[in-house]
Amino acid sequence: LLVANLSEAEEKCSCGDIIRAVRAAQKEGIVAQEFNPDSKSELLKRYRILTAPTVLFLDASGNEVARYEGEDRGTVAAIRSHLKRMTERSGS
């Protein structure tokens, strides 16, 4: 679950890096839903999304496995690492 200002996807900023990383993982078979922070989706309420960008990793039952909020370097690296592990598992 990706919540971010999706219009920043092509910008050279950390938020853009996060959006591009999630979209690249989708091309590798990872299922993701994208929302702008002003979305009226019930998922934003259910998972208490309070800041953007936020990336949530959910299990098959919809339980939160990991949450990354913000766009500092460490957060971007952690998201990329988590996505890489997921794509490696899905490719095996």
Image: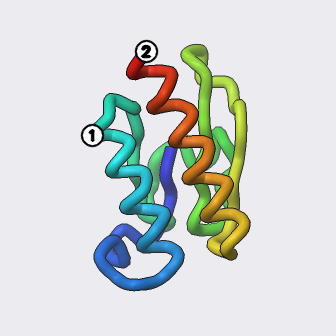
Which mark is drawn over residue 75? none
In the rendered image, the vertical position of residue 27 relative to residue 88, given as above or below: below
Q: Report the residue that reaches farthest toward the bottom.
A: 12
Q: Locate residue 29: give its quadrant.
A: top left
Could you tell me the amino acid type at mark 2? Ser
Mark sitting earlier along the chain (1/2): 1
In the rendered image, the vertical position of residue 60 relative to residue 23, given as above or below: above
Secondary structure beneath label 2: loop
Q: Is residue 52 left or right of residue 34?
A: right
Which quadrant, please, contains the C terminus? top left
Query: Considering depth in this image, is 27 or 43 the residue closer to the camera?
Result: 27
Residue at (45%, 69%) from the top-left corner? 17
Q: Which residue is mark 1?
A: 27
Residue at (71%, 39%) from the top-left corner? 66
Q: Count residues near mark 1 (Cα–Cα under 10 Å), then give few for <14, some for 14-19, many for 20+.
A: few
Could you tell me the amino acid type at mark 1? Lys
Q: In this rendering, which labeled residue sits more in front, label 1 or label 2?
A: 2
**Residue 43 on image: x %, y %:** 54, 41
Secondary structure beneath label 1: helix
Q: Count residues near mark 2 (Cα–Cα under 10 Å), then give few for <14, some for 14-19, many for 20+.
A: few
Q: Is residue 82 left or right of residue 39?
A: right
Q: Is residue 39 left or right of residue 51?
A: left
Query: Considering depth in this image, is 73 or 52 the residue closer to the camera?
Result: 73
Please give the count of numbered marks on the rendered protein. 2
Q: Which residue is mark 2?
A: 92
**Residue 89 on image: x %, y %:** 51, 21
Residue at (43%, 21%) from the top-left corner? 90
Spatial separation of the CA atoms under disc 1 and disc 2: 15 Å
Q: Locate residue 50: give its quadrant.
A: bottom right
**Residue 73 on image: x %, y %:** 67, 73
Q: Are marks 1 and 2 in contact (CB under 8 Å)?
A: no
**Residue 86 on image: x %, y %:** 52, 31
